[in-house]
Amino acid sequence: MTSVRLFPARFIRSRARAHRAMARAALFSDSSSSVRLGRYNDHMAKAISLESHTEQESAQ
């Protein structure tokens, strides 16, 4: 059975880039520092997860 790609790699890379941009924007938002850091960490975790997923697909 062949694997079917639901999302092309470029779509995943662009989502990772978007999460990195949102992480940077979270640092300068008008919120408390703990909220800003939490949002930054959440977006960076998503970006890293998406990039590792892309790397795993390209290795196969």
Image (tube, rainbow, N blue to C red):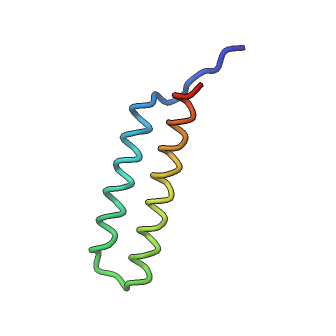
**Quadrant including the N terminus:** top right
Q: How many marks?
A: 0
Residue ID at (44%, 38%)? 12
**Residue with the most extreme right position:** 1
**Quadrant including the C terminus:** top right
Residue 5 occupies which quadrant of the picture? top right
Residue ID at (36%, 40%)? 14
**Residue with the most extreme top position:** 1
- The spot of residue 46 in percent (x, y) is 49, 54
Front residue of 52/17: it is 52
- The spot of residue 7 in percent (x, y) is 49, 30
- The spot of residue 29 in percent (x, y) is 29, 75
**Residue with the most extreme bottom position:** 32
Q: Is residue 46 left or right of residue 29?
A: right
Whether residue 20 is situated above or below residue 55 in the rendered picture: below
Whether residue 13 is situated above or below residue 47 in the rendered picture: above
